[in-house]
Amino acid sequence: MDPELDDEEEVCVEVSGQPHSTQSEPAEKMKNSQYDDVIAAPRSTMDRSKLSTKKQDFQVRVNVHEGRKLLGGNIHPVCNVHVGKQSKHSRVQKSTNKPLWDEVLFFDFNCSALDLCDEPVTIEVLNSRKIRSDSLIGAFKFDLGLVYESTDHQFVHKWVLLTDPEDKDSGAKGYVKISISILGPGDKLKIPPKSSSTDDLVDIESNLLRPAGVQLQPATYTVKIYKAEDVPKMDTDYLEGMKRVLRLQHGDHDLVDPYMIVSFAGKKLKTKVMYKTYTPEWDQELNIGVQMPSMCEQLMLRLMDKDHFNRDDIIATHFLQLTRLSSADPDDEGFLPTFGPAYVNFYGSPRESIVDDELEPLNRGCGEGCSFRGRALVELTVNIGQEPGKDELIRDIDSEDLLRVQPFQRRRRYRLFVGFLEGTMIHPVDAPVEFEISIGEYGNKFASTTLPAPSTTQPTNPVYDGSHYYYLPWGQTKPCVMLNSQWEDVMFRIESLNLICRTIDRLEGHLKDVKYLMRAKAPLAESAGKLIKLLDELIIDLNQPLLELPQKNITELDKKLYALRDDEMKRILIEAVNLRENARDIDVAINEIDSYIYRLQQIATEPQNSIPDVIIWMLCGNRRVAYHRIPSHQVMFSPKTDCCGKLCGHVFSVFLKRPSVPDKSNAKRQWKLPAKLQVFVWMGLEDHAKGIQHKPLDGEISVFAETYENMISLLSKWTIRAMPRPKWSDITGQLKLPKESFTTPPGWRWDGEWFINPNLSLSYDLDSGLSTFQDDVFENQLRVPGSDWPTSKLFWTDVTGEEAQSKEEIMCPTGWEWTDIWTVDLNRAVDEEGYEYCLDQSVGGFVPVEKTYHLCRRRRWVRTRKRNPDLRQQAAHQRMVRAAEEGWEYSRLFTTKFHLKQRTMDMVRRRRWHRKMVADNPDADAIFIIDPTSDTHESKEDKESGRKDSAVGEKPFLPKVQAPRMFITFKEPHTYQLRAYIYQARDLFSADPSGLSDPYARVVFSRQSQRTKVLNETLCPTWDQTLVFEEVEFFGNPTMLAESPPIVVVELFDYDTVGGSDFLGRAIATPIVKLGGEHQMAKLNWHPITRGGEPAGELLGAFELYLNEGAELPFMPPTRQDVYQVPSGIRPVMQLTRIEVLTWGVRHMKKFQLAAVNSPSIEIECGGVVLSTIKIKNAKKNPNFDTSSMLFDVFLPVEELYTPPLNIRLLDHRSFGVKPLVGTHMIKSLQEYRRDPVAMVQTIREKMLESGFGEAEYSLDMEFADQAVDPAPPPAPTSSSSEEGEFKEDVDWWSKYYSSSGNEQLGRVYREKGYENMVVFEEELENYFDNFTDLAQSFPLFHGKRHEDEDLDEDKAVGYFKGTFRVYPLPADGSDPPPRMLKNVPCNQLVEVLVRVYIVKAFELQPQDPNGLSDPYLALKLGRFKVKDRENYVPKNLSPTFGKMFELDGTLPLESELRVQIFDYDLLSGDDLIGETKIDLENRFLSARRGVCGLPKRYYIAGPYKWRDAELPRQILEKWCATQALPAPVWRGNSQVYVNGKTCCLRDYETRGQVHKDWGPPEERLALYTLLDLGLVPEHIETRTLYNPLRPEIPQGKIQIFVDIFPKSATIPPPINITPRAPQDLELRVIVYNVQDVILSDTSFTGEKMSDIYVKGWLKGQDKKQKTDVHYRSLNGEGNFNWRYIFPFKYLPAEEVMVIKKKEHFFSLDKHEEKYPVTFVAQIWDNDIFTPDDFLGLLELNLNFMPKANKFPKSVTLDDLPDNEKGKPVPMVSLFDQKNVKGWWPMYEEGGPDTPRELTGKVEMELEILSKEDSEAKPAGKGQEEPNENPHLDPPNRPATSFLWFTSPWKSLRYIIWNNYKWYIIGGLILLLILAMVGLFIYSAPGALSEKIIAKL
């Protein structure tokens, strides 16, 4: 069974299985390939492997606009859209091949972004008139990833080319215009602009979803699969045995039957199966046919194992990213995908994984593969021209190709050296730990196909570090491994890659420094100098040429990549030089340099690097626990310095991680680091490896032969009899290794004899790493039933019951000293004497109360000792001597953990023997060849034990190989001291139910770890603590350590009294190494804290590492409560700062602990100072604080970089003094609130003096004296005025709306009259005015435990604090403080207001009904007031126009949130909420931006746009100055005013010099202009996004509204009328006079060409069609009709559309409204009686934009149409302007995209538009019916030959038979007459002749 050929098989396309650029691609995505660049709009590039795998809600919106040039005539097209497994369709458009759908189809998904990108999209157009099997016109397919990678995740107005999927060579079938958008959490809904459906001149080709000018063409992707190597076995030995039992397999089997599957563009092919082999050679060519351009971006190679017993196993998966193998650079020619021949490496789950392992998805490519699983030699080429035939899909590779790829398989010897310097941060394990290094199959200790190699470290028991973690006590003997391997010669590829990577690394490092200076507010000159230095070094790097390609063994991709890299680096060089010379803005330059980095990263990829990654495995016993992958190019050595890998020859830290599948690993396991390693890695050719074998890192490499001596305990005696393993063996006991069996390999010799080398990690006791330790021993007593406890019979045990020394015999170990005496431990569940009782000691179950049946009791004696630092060396020496005495290790079994001291239950023991070797030949391999069956190697003891070689488990006479142990031996270590300055942290996760944490930091450095003090209940702790790590030992050269410092790991935890601490995050830092003489102090830096890969806060700290070898160290920092503080030279410089707080109130408080928050108070904390407000008495009645302005002084750092966060905490005052913490909010940076009040006041004074304004003055200018009016607006003109009537006819509010929206056509009259537009905001109004937070902001308060998957979503807030802050420094000399800034705040009492909500229209609403539509209506909610406009719902509409105004009464701030909702009307069930938007009215009311009523651009006191605010402009200006604490406006006359340091003149705004008659007084006009300049809210319409609470992150549509807020205490103006315009009743009259040159489609039985012509006509969108009578037997293509059509319709002149209200189907309850362009369609048909009528031609006329008619039919051609193929301009007219049009137009039959139109006739018509009144005054009948007037139509003057033959038989005889056969008839009659005469002659001649003869006789 083959799972890969099943359509249901899941294919995971994540490429993180090859995460490194060595195997697939870098982290960033290259430019699109030339076949993938299918859109004209800009595309954003992304790496799909980095997309989130977390399931989320997504919505795909497909807007189907229209179709063009669809194949066929008189078709009824419908568009089907398939997205994934969902399908939806549009409405059917009848009788057109240019359908106008304009519908939005919605598709909802709940999946990850990665999976969403793989969902296919199919656009189909079908003809609904045909049967379903033959209805498809054309289709287009792509995947959603193409849309997701586009700008804003959307396509806008793109044309897709339709083709026949069954016959790709049949050409194009038409075009469909679509817009597609993908909305995810947090995405903003962007409505595509409306496209003009009446524009027939749209150039489809310029915006087609394909490369410009390239037609779809067939192509063949040829994938040549040559061979594979190192394929792992997939069957376990158990399954192998089962197969043999079931006779499914016979004989020996290699346990793998591999074959390869290649998948691309939904097509799959597979190679043949190669049985019983690890190294299959398929030598097959797989050809996949596709159509170019293809939308698929990756080609999948999947290695499979054939299995007859169950489903075929997936061995591994590799994805070839085609965008990395091709180029579509517009600056060069680009190239098609190409690859190889080269090896690709496969990764997946560990090779030792069992069947149905949870890591099996890694083999599918889901997640990062953690183990090498083989490699395959493949080649990819693309040929354009034709697709392969069925017999060409799979074929064998030619022998020539097999010979061609031979040179590419040439191998070279590589050497990999890894030195392990430290193994720390190890969690408790139950077995010794060892590390394995592998590259490919080499080094895998469980592999059977490669020779053993010294690839593993010695098993070592971890030792406790005294704080939390364990470390490996390697001491001065560090394990190392060395692997020899053979790979292809790809050094030229790796060197080029490393050269670019080095350039990127240097550039990123310098740019990071520049950004840090910018963040720290460094002087501009310093930042600019650093930036210039960066550019100089970049120019130097880019001037360095790329390495030349070798002459042989290079692929086509090598050449293409070389040219691509060279061109791109030259372009960047030119741009960098220009930037260096012309840069003026640092921010702009930084953005430009970021683009350089991105572009360099695109070319920093090498898909043909066939050397696998280096994998470090941590093994515990025989279990693989954790791993780390290192790309091979990063550790590769090159003689050229810049071409070396960045990690080659360096010491660096490695964090291991556990193998896991995305979204399936335990969250707690993810943060726990299995181990941290400090390693030295070098890899390179053997020719370059000579130096690495001599003292790396100042150490000496030692090689040892190793064997273990084993013994077993029988009857308390140690013996070798009946042992389960040989006396001499390897560490596993599987290989017999007597000392005599070792023979030095060639090139090596012995250096000394065998010696015992014990594992020193066993010598560490429980007190290792601790400074104090408590010894304990148990005093035990036994008794017989019924007796007392004896006092003399005592025995001593440990806690496990093992026999121990008495307390008097226990001596203090060397290096320790007692601190007290032996005492009984009473801090346990014991009685007063410290005893605990049980029935039997072996059973346990001790209790503190004595019973009569208890027979055993014990008590614990304890004594504390502390470590003596002076005796540390002596203790370490004694420990080593004790371990080396005999070297035995003891254990219960050979498979359990060993220990140094013998215990009672120990049954086995062993000790390790080593013998040193030295190399005479540096290139020799250190591999022993051992014959375990040799008799000479069998000792006397082995013979006595009776043990055979069965334990070895191998075939006889099979030689064995054994790898030695390798170590780096150092001399004395160097001692260092680390000082960790932990100052503070911010924005930590909350881990306690209170919403806070009790954080502490654990600092891990080398083999030590320490922790800070615990700070209670804070998310922004300030520890101000220095942790000093004494006697930190490092081996090696201190200079090398300074170049590559060891990292410091800081882990933050939440302390819990019960249970373990909760992990909060981890930060990584690098210390500053000071070897002596450095005096520069360390600087505090913010280090990012992460948890689970997500940001979890920041840590402010610094770290210094001092070489402590006699040099004088700085003085220790000062202490506070026995804790070192951060020294003054490092801690920030403080300054006395004042913080003013506006405590306005609380809002939207949710219940807390099942009770309402009624009496809240606020605590403001910053820098350790806490300010508390008074509590609110009753938040339900008034949620504002009585005191709105407060302040406090605090010492804050001068540098903003170090400023601590400001914390807001809300408490609720409840009964009995309970004050629970309800919520918190943290402000990271106070920069937003910093002010300098002294400088502000001084600036205003200076500007006033400069402007010449003194005391305030006001007078009217004489030129405006005659226009001076009373400040109050005059009454509105009466309705009888002629002007107002003119306005009603020409302009209204909708005219202003259309003009402001950019609709040039509908707003033309408005603009011509000179009126100003209002502002139409594309988003919420608050987004343009800082959320109206100039007075007060709303800070969300959060509470509760937060996890990795929780976001700071405001919907999860428990409430909001409304207020703001002002931060400014106080004088250092103690002088008077500056004036307060928050003093002129408005009153915070309750205010009653009138709210007017104007709702214009909605867009793109989410459908709620099964038909894909909705019946929307409006609902509003303000506090307790609700309004529902349910009776006025708009049926079946997703973009309704409402034009409604609602008035609501409210009280601020109690009712401050306005909710505008749109519901879907349902008759039977409950109405569904489509979406809602929320508006904070209080912020708008309080804001100085004045969001209560928009200010128009002109001040009118009359007319349709007169002033509509409650206050006059001058009043508003004066109030604004007061709220901003500014001087009142200073007037000079009525044409000049001074405000806010600026002089405003009326003439600067009214430049035309003309004053409109409806304008108000000049001072009011000037005040209005000044207000607009000050940034107050203009007259506007805001576009708000609708959201549904069920899907709070997915937009559900948009709505256009504007809101006016008026206090009831003011005079409230009248509202605006925004009622939608009503359509006009019009009538279209069309008279069809004649047709000419109609094609003759029929042939009579007489052979004549003829047609029975009639003309059909209708208005597009109306279902009622009218047709003329039939002009029968047209023999010359002419037809005469004189026939009238009458079409009444409703018309909107402003929008130039026809409004149609109709039911969707018979059972529909409501008529829905649709708008169509007024298009008249005329068609010519040939009438048939017994068969369907034949379609001959059509004509479509948009009555607003129609071609001008011709006077004579001879001049009519196809060039008269506006979309003619020649592009010839055509004069156009509007029937609504001319009212009547008469003339000739061409009729045509539409061809396909590849076929031209055909002229099929000409029609003479007269078209007339009449209003309802005119149509009633001029009645007319349809056709020639009465009243046949206006004009009168005479019957058509048709020729006599026009008739229906079977209704007029005599006419048929006359005009058909006689006209065509009269000469035949006359000739026949004459012939008959002649024949009759001849017959009569013959008949009568004999008689007459005889009579005549007789008569003569």
Image: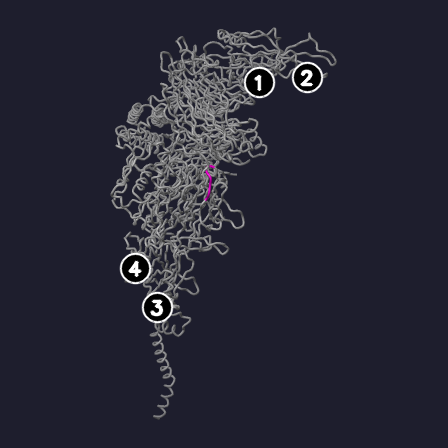
Question: Which residue has dot 4 on it?
Answer: 1749
Q: Residues within 10 Å of mark 1 (few under 14, many from 20)?
A: many
- From the image, state whether disc 3 or disc 1 is nearer to you: 3
- From the image, state whether disc 3 or disc 4 is nearer to you: 3
Question: Which residue has dot 1 on it?
Answer: 894
Give the amino acid at mark 3. Answer: His
**Residue 175 among those drawn in magenta:** no
Residue 944 position (above or below residue 1894): above
Q: Residues within 10 Å of mark 2 (few under 14, many from 20)?
A: few
Give the amino acid at mark 2. Answer: Val
Answer with mark 3 or mark 1, whichever residue precedes in sequence.
Answer: 1
Please state the horizontal and vertical placement of residue 931, each as a whole percent of the image: 51, 18
Foreground pick, 349 / 1134: 1134
| Res 1832 label | 3
Q: Are marks 4 and 1 in contact (CB under 8 Å)?
A: no
What's the residue at 59%, 34% (across, down)? 246
Q: Secondary structure at mark 4?
A: loop
Q: Which residues are magenta?
A: 1448-1453
